[in-house]
Amino acid sequence: MFDNVSIFNFSGVYDEESFYLKDKGSSFYDAGTADDIPSIKLYDMKDISGTNCMCDDMAVESIRDIFKNENVTPYGIHFIDSGNYHYMSALLTEMVKEPFSLVVLDHHPDMQPPMFGDILSCGGWVLKVLNENKYVRDVHVIGADEGLISKLDPEDARKAKFYSVDESECLDANRSENADGKEINIQKFEFDTFSTEYPVYLSIDKDVILKSEVITNWDQGNMTSSQLFLLVKKLAASGKLLGVDICGECATDQEDCDVGKAIAGNDEFNRRIMGFLIGA
């Protein structure tokens, strides 16, 4: 389906993975699909300061310059490092120049107001897209924690549609309440019937997946990787998938896991989803 892959290496974690390498030591080569990829490009972002969790104005301009100089587009597959850099989705989608739906798979709503000024952050990028992207028509957040959704400002929460893969979170005929007792709609996600009116930009944070299946550097949800692939398959089959980004790598210095095994698990997941999206 897609013929280009961009990999943005902020933390250095992709130096420890091989899913994208066209050589005999890579996990992607071992899968027998490396020759199917016309373009894979790794971008070294480690020297850009002001990017960890929050992306300051100078960093934003540096990233936009890379996009411009390297002809990066939103139309393809993008690996954007750990969830600390999920704000890259906002910078990629600002290049979409047609009406689109944003579909987000994430254990966190990522709709927090800026901590100061108008700074772009991993925890607030969805809200920024809603408020500033003139081409986005609707936003669907799938798998976010009900407790985190309940803490959102009600006015902000009404701008997006929330779906749970856990029936216990769809309270009182798909209703829940925020911290002030005001209702927020959380619908039960139907994998078989979900669709959008507009072409889709899909943003995947692997922290939506059970920790027993893949380890990230954030708290995690209860979606299975099989459920995730089912949704991706449906969106790909619709012919309306504009582009995809994937984040949720573990940290190279993470202390709550066997880092080597965690990186290997992420490497394998990345290989699977890249191969799927190329062949879809």
Image (cartoon, grey):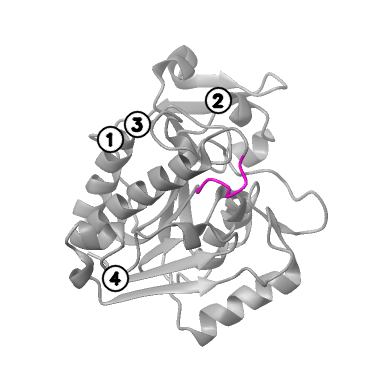
Q: Which residues are magenta?
A: 249-254
Tell me the amino acid under the disc marked 4. Answer: Lys
Q: Which residue corresponds to mark 2?
A: 146
Which comes sooner in the sequence, label 4 or label 1?
A: 4
Circle 4: element type: loop
Q: Which mark is residue 22?
A: 4
Distance of mark 3 from mark 2, alpha carbons? 17 Å
In the image, residue 189 above or below residue 264: above
Q: Nearer the viewer, residue 125 or 134?
A: 125
Between circles 4 and 2, the one closer to the viewer is 4
Specify the amino acid type for callout 1.
Answer: Ser
Q: Is residue 98 left or right of residue 27?
A: right
Taking 153 as reference, is 80 above or below it?
Answer: below
Residue at disc 1, secondary structure: helix
Residue 97 is left or right of residue 147, and the answer is left
Return the x and y of residue 222 as percentages of the image width and height.
43, 27
How many discs mark residues in the rendered view?
4
Residue located beneath label 1 in the image: 226
In magenta stretch: residue 154: no
